[in-house]
Image (spheres, helix red, strand yellow):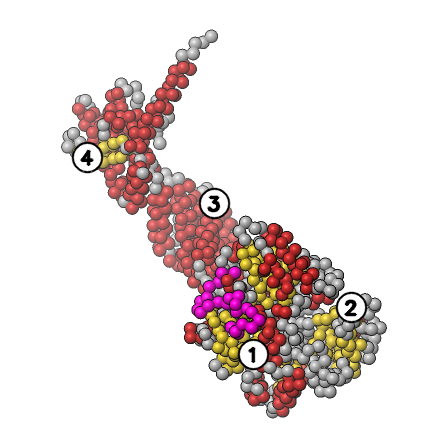
Amino acid sequence: MRRVIDRLRLGLRALFRGDAMDRELDEELRYHLERQIEEHISRGMPPALARREALLAIGGLDQRKEECRDMRKTRVLEDLARDLRYAVRTLRRSPGFTAVIVASLALGIGANTAMFSAIDAVMLRLLPVRQPERLVVLEWTGDGVPKGFADSLEGPHGFIFPTVAYEEIRDRNDVFDGVFAFAGNTPAVNVGLRGRADWASVKGVSGNYFDVLGVPAAAGRMLTPDDDRESAALVVVASHRFWSQKLGEDPGVVGSSIIVNAAPVTIVGVAPTEFFGVDASTPTDLFMPLHAYAAQLVAGGNAGDVPFTRDPQTWWLLVGGRLKSGVTAREAEVRVNLLFERSLRAANAGAPHTARTPPVTSVPAGRGLDRLRNRYGASLLLLMGMVGLVLLIACANVAGLLLARASAREREIRIRLSLGAGPFRLVRQFLTESVLLALVGGVAGLGCAVWIDAALAGLLTETDTAPVVMHLDGRLLAFTAAISVLTGIGFGLAPAIRATRLDVRPAARLMSRKLLVSTQVAMCLLLLIGAGLLQRTLLKLEGVDLGFERQHLVQFSVRPGLNGYKDARLIGYYDELQRRLDAAPLVRSSTLSLRPAVGGGSASSSAIIPGVTKVDERVTIFRHQVGSRYFETLGIPTVAGRTIGPHDLRGAPHVAVVNQTLVQKYFHDADPIGHRLVFGSAATANSFEIVGVVQDVKYGKLRGDTPPVAYLPYQQFLALPSFMTFQVRGRGTEGSAGSLVAAIRREALALDPNVPVVAIASQAEAVAEMLTLERTLAMLSSFFGVIALALACVGFYGTMAYAVARRTREIGVRIALGARSRAIEQMILRETAVMVVVGVAAGVPLALAAGRLLRAQLYGLSPYDPATAVTATVAVFVVTMLAGYIPARRASRVDAMVALRCE
Amino acid sequence: MSKPSDLVQGTLDLLILKIIALEPLHGWAISQRLKQVSGDVLQVSDGSLYPALHKLEQEGWITATWKPTENNRRAKFYDLTRAGRKELERETAKWQRLSTAITGVVKLKEA
């Protein structure tokens, strides 16, 4: 122990009192010398000889001192401190040089840090729950599932289960510490907030949801199993977002009641800020117990007559659990499969259970469900690659600058080497300098990151959805520090080694700088071509032909069903709203449909077409449930027959209008009018006579071809829709869409002030919103491309300026011998051009190869789009030549006399 | 570092520790004592003594204090620590093993 303390004391002394220790060493050795000299003299040696003898015996005082210092354990640290002090002094002596490097690195490191934080938030971060690594959700897979059912969902796998399965697994397993469930959908409800009509998204969750997850209340309390019973009092927990945005962060709302779909519900608590549910990509406003949630769906006319909690046939719940410690996922799955099978058999007692029970697997849910990851993962990785390139360009810049400076410091290095400094020691000194630079760049980069993060949050938070939180924390700082140090070593090592090998001819050094610059051009081109492709994709998608006119078209949604409108009253509401809108002076025409023409998702059913489809063959038909004057209002031309009108009521004969793709695909261009489309099974057949054919328009999404679509009168397909999208075509006379929007709101609220107008937007805005991802990608990649170009310019300018400075004498001689300044200019520019051409020659094939990675993001153009490649190349060429022109011009203005005298 | 060529590697440490174990001494006195006791057989150069002292100090086997000398000047006196005493025992045992072994080899008669 004593020894440890002794050594620690020595170490600390060496670090902080190094000077004192050196003085002591000096004194110690001097004492020795003096005694030795006295000794020699006492033996009769002349003093001068005595001194010489003593010194010889010790053999070089300074070497001995250095050896003694080397014995100190803290030598490395001492040297580091000295190197750091030296580096700070050197950098402060050339502030311009330092500023350029720090700025380059700040942009490079900042962009990387920002991207990392986004990727961290979306892809890596664990849910803010207790022991997230033991959390799983169940997924069934396989083809034993009734086929039509699987098709209508998410393909041959799914996350949703019927209530019976959840209850069986919850109550009879011995592998989980708690099993919870939550509804797959997050529907909107109408809420009354202090007398104001508004809406909220609601998540049905089991009573033990928060308890099993281990999520504590931020205010009030969370839900309990007692809340989740058939006749329990109606309660909800508000998400933190809802609480802060709609309830004004008022702690007093806990215990107060709000109106949810016309029923009073008590807010019992608020969820913590960082908790958005297990399915974090779907924003949730209110967490409601499953029983209340199911009852609310029935009351709102969205779920037939039997609540899902009592219906063994409806698959609607995601089931999650916390694995008991010591239980593996595999063991849990075995148990779950038995229970699942048993629950389904019990539920189907009586009815023949033909289909095989699909096997269930457990999926780790510690990072939440991966919808957000799927949606943005590829884009984020793409951007990460781009910022990686930006950082490389920045590094190349810095390496170039350091190389240039190393040659400027040649004299200093020569002196130090000849004084006995080891090359390794010098390399370490240079590395200290570059790492210091990189760390300063990293700190500045954090500032940049905050700024870039704000832009990224825009990407990940479409309008009011996708709650992605990004914050500067230990991981982020660790990441930034790591890339700073790595880049510091990366860009510093080559120049440092170069600097200490003095045999390298300066010409070779200039050559390597030129290669660096060409590399920058290549990488820059790669980025710009990528950005250009994304930008052009965005333009193509924005200008995509929807198939109908989007001018003066405004759409909005209403959900009167949630306010208790049913049957005839519901139809009455829709009719009346349409009548009022049509009567408004700014409106040319209005119509309604279950979903908006684009951007509202899709719905499909399998159907048979008697006389066309083979026996047992079913075809997939996409549906649009529409009201009268749909085609007239949107301006979709009729090809044959009639459209859907006000007389196509619920009781009237069922009719359908189909699009041209359907006719081509199933009728092979024969006349379809008079044929029938039969949806549903034989027992529940729902038959529609085709009465008209219309031109194709985009369906659901902007990308891809139009699928076969059947337009059905909204009153005639199954249950009456309790919500509806209205599309209103303005006259376009009053000019602004704003006044049309105001008029629409006025009419809707005059009809019923308790039915809120939701998501009102012009068609152009709606399309723009569908393209948020594409726009942000295009924006950010262009932004990174411009940064890259700017960095490359700095590198270019620096290299050329350096080249010109080195050749001042040569240029002076040329001018003195009669060279025209124009010729000098051209000579320098020619050199610049060579570097650019080399860079372009390397960059274009590279970009073409990398373009394949972009294919999935592109629309309407190939990754090898020549126009993009040419534009990017021209841009790089022009900008870099400009950067090279300034030094060239300066070279041509060299005064021969001054130049010749300067050496 | 200049090595005392006549000295078996590592034995300098042992010698220093042993000499200091008798009484605390300063560097010059140690060098004198070395020459004295070995009858000038072990020529330890003054140059290699000090780095060795500093190394032993870093290891925590000896400590140094500034004290007045016999002729009333200030010098750095080295003393053995408890750990140093143990190290000395270890090194001594090691040396004895080694020298016994070498003696044995050297005494082998040629056939």
Q: Chain of mark 4?
A: B
**On the rendered image, what quadrant is the N terminus of chain A found in?**
top left
Name the residue tied to disc 2.
A618
Gap between marks 2 and 1, in whole Å?
Answer: 39 Å
Indicate yes or no whether the magenta region holds residue A224. yes
Q: Residues within 10 Å of mark 4 (few under 14, many from 20)?
A: some
Nearer-N-terminus badge (2/1): 1
Gap between marks 4 and 3, in whole Å?
Answer: 57 Å
Nearer-N-terminus badge (2/3): 3
Nearer-N-terminus badge (1/3): 1
State the mark number for residue B67: 4
Does any portion of residue A520 appear in the rendered image? no
State the mark number for residue A15: none
Q: Residue at x 72, y 85 (%)?
A: A649
Q: Residues within 10 Å of mark 1 (few under 14, many from 20)?
A: many
| Of the two numbered discs 1 and 3 in the rendering, the one whose residue sits closer to the viewer | 1
Q: Main secondary structure of the magenta part?
A: loop
Query: Range of the magenta residues?
Result: A212-235
Name the residue tied to disc 3.
A505
Tell me where residue A611 appears, x and y as whole percent.
84, 73
Residue type, label 3: Arg
Q: Chain of mark 2?
A: A
